[in-house]
Image (cartoon, rainbow, N blue to C red):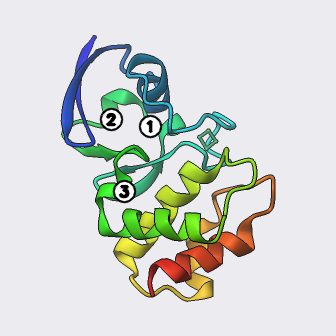
Amino acid sequence: MTINIKINGTVHTVDADGDTPLLWVLRDVLGMTGTKFGCGAGLCGACTVHLDGQAVRACQTPIDSVGESSITTIEAIGETPQGKALQQSWIDLDVPQCGYCQSGQIMSAAALLAATPKPTDADIDAAMSGNVCRCGTYQRIRAAIHRATA
Ligand code: FES
């Protein structure tokens, strides 16, 4: 079926089954590979994008459930104040190790800061608990989120 989806401010027309996960459409149909495939089961957070500003798992979001909602991906999060500040603090604190999970980490952090501009450690831990990092960069992620709010 033909579906129109709004991603990073642009409407894309894609030909895909309605139950195709958004992650597949982003990566395989549209070539937007900044959003990562980790587990494909909603467990790791590597595929996190924003759906009308809320952090969601793209691997668990059927394309026909998106409707008129606006999707934001890591490719455009730097255009938001939160995303721009977070990307700079990620660089300043050298957060990534292997880097694979970091797109999803930043997307979850950006949703957190949009809702809670000055999060506590507990706020950060709660908001980021669904984003797994096999390199264990959690302390730097927490510090970078605080830095982005300074
Ligand atoms: Fe979607 Fe892991 S790839 S949560």
How far across and down, in percent of the image, does residue 70 sit?
24, 45
What amino acid does circle 1 point to? Answer: Thr
Q: Which residue is mark 1?
A: 61
The CB of the residue at mark 3 lies under 8 Å from ligand 1: no
Local crowd at mark 3 within 10 Å, few (<14), some, or many (≥20)? Answer: some
Quadrant of image for the C terminus = bottom left
Residue at x 48%, y 66% (from the top left corner):
88
Q: Can I make out residue 125 in this image?
A: no
Residue at x 38%, y 14% (from the top left corner):
17
Q: Nearer the viewer, mark 1 or mark 3?
A: 3
- Residue at the extreme front of the image, as rendered: 92
Q: Secondary structure at mark 3?
A: helix
Quadrant of image for the N terminus = top left
Q: Secondary structure at mark 1?
A: loop
Q: Earlier in the sequence, mark 3 or mark 2?
A: 2
Q: Is residue 42 above or below residue 55?
A: above
How far across and down, in percent of the image, does residue 85 sit?
41, 70
Is residue 145 shown left or right of residue 140? left
Q: Which residue is mark 3?
A: 78
Q: Is residue 18 above or below residue 45?
A: above
Q: Is residue 48 above or below residue 94?
A: above
Q: Quadrant of ligand 1?
A: top right
What amino acid does circle 2 point to? Answer: Ser
Q: Earlier in the sequence, mark 1 or mark 3?
A: 1
Q: Nearer the viewer, mark 3 or mark 2?
A: 3
Local crowd at mark 1 within 10 Å, few (<14), some, or many (≥20)? Answer: some
Q: Which residue is mark 2?
A: 65
What amino acid does circle 3 point to? Answer: Gly
Q: Could you tell me if the residues under marks 1 and 3 are in contact, i.e. CB atoms within 8 Å?
A: no
How far across and down, in percent of the image, does residue 100 sit?
67, 44
Q: Could you tell me if the residues under marks 2 and 1 are in contact, i.e. CB atoms within 8 Å?
A: yes
Q: Can I make out residue 78 in this image?
A: yes
